[in-house]
Amino acid sequence: MSRTGDKKFTGFRVFPTGVALVLTEVVFWIVVGMVWYGVQQIAPNVQWGQLNWAPLLLAIPTSVVLFIWSYNLKSRWAKRLADEHLWPNTLPAWRPRLLGWKFALWRLALVCAVFGIMDLKVGARLREVKSEGVDIMLALDVSNSMEAEDLGMSRLDLGKRTIERLVGQLDGDRVGLVVFAGDAYVQCPITTDYGAIKLFLNQVSTGLVPVQGTAVGRAMEVCQEGFDTASLASKMIVVLTDGENHEDDAVDIAKQIAGASIEIHTIGMGTVNGGPIPLYDRYGRSNGFKVDQEGQPIVTALDEATLIQIAETGNGTFILAGQGLVNLNPIFDAMRAMDQQEVATLSYTDYTHLFQYFLAAVLLLLLVESIVGLPLGRSRSLVKTYES
């Protein structure tokens, strides 16, 4: 009896099992990334319909970590119950190797469930869509001073929410995103894909631009370079910044850009009295405020006068952010007064959704997972029960 048990019971192998699962997880995501890249090159009509559920993907590697932890815990429990050479008799039905296979099936079901929720879809009909609008480049300040919370939240968070609100009310207009601090970069080229703007916006943080400062002039130059020179649509630049610590002559640059018939609007992200710059540890917990050489908190205030001058030079408007809200009506009023050009773009209007196939795979994998490890007789009876 003991020998028979030895053949069935392989014992816990925590370290090799954990290594195998981690390596498998890494290979899995590399393969998924390569496959998705290849699909996008060959069939750009394949898209995710619900990318806002993408954070659920984190549950997949997290499940691997939790399984390894529980597997190790079960190993410790088994050692407390009895010595390892007695396990075949004391734990005859406990097969650790089988736990790994059952988890693999469950994890694959989780992958299919998340992919199903994200709603993979294939464009079935491509046609030309015409719309009228203006071209807008948004410049968002990501310098450290944008972490100040004198607006009821961090200036950067309010700036991101303001851009989301602005983009959410656009219809047919093309929009691009530039981030800047001591230098400026195009975060998203000008496009009518508002979902792409929001996706890129989610990645914005104060550490995105390594060079610190507030080069508003450079940001406006990058915005000007980001416009489509072949487009006859009216052009607008909207700068969201606290305007402090300029690295260049922003007013002079605004004058040059205005000469190219580009309106410049500024949104002051901050208060005149200002506020300290909070510091956080790697876990996101508050860790005091940024201080100067004398140990006093650094207070960052809005440079309202300069932003007003930039807006006046650029034939635009200056908007002062309120507590938790920015009034965007002056921007929309300016857009309505602009000449709008008809833009024709090719877009997929009809899609075939594939989520049902992923959900069917989830049910099948969970069924197989529930059967694996059962005695043959019970497995057959369970299959008959499902069939009936």
Image: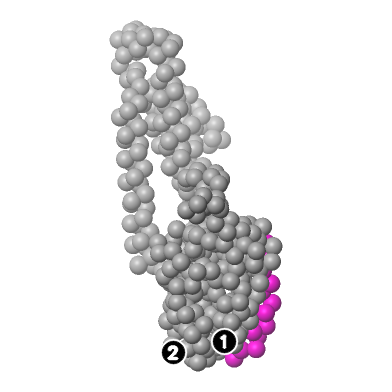
Image point (30%, 16%), residue name = 7
Image point (65%, 89%), residue name = 337
Spatial separation of the CA atoms under disc 1 and disc 2: 25 Å
Task: Name the mark nearer the viewer: 1 or 2.
Answer: 1
Vertical position of residue 78 compared to residue 332: above or below: above
Looking at the picture, the colour scheme in use is: one colour
Q: Amino acid at mark 2?
A: Ala
> Which segment is the magenta one?
324-340
Q: Which residue is mark 2?
A: 230
Q: Position of residue 119 (x, y in %)?
A: 52, 57
Mark sitting earlier along the chain (1/2): 2
Q: Is residue 243 visible?
A: yes
| In this rendering, position of residue 221 left or right of residue 165 | left
Q: Position of residue 242 (x, y in %)?
A: 57, 68
Vertical position of residue 227 compared to residue 99: above or below: below
Residue 334 belongs to magenta span:
yes
Vertical position of residue 5 compared to residue 250: above or below: above
Vertical position of residue 258 compared to residue 56: above or below: below
Q: Indicate the secondary structure of the residue bearing disc 2.
A: loop
Q: Position of residue 298 (x, y in %)?
A: 54, 57
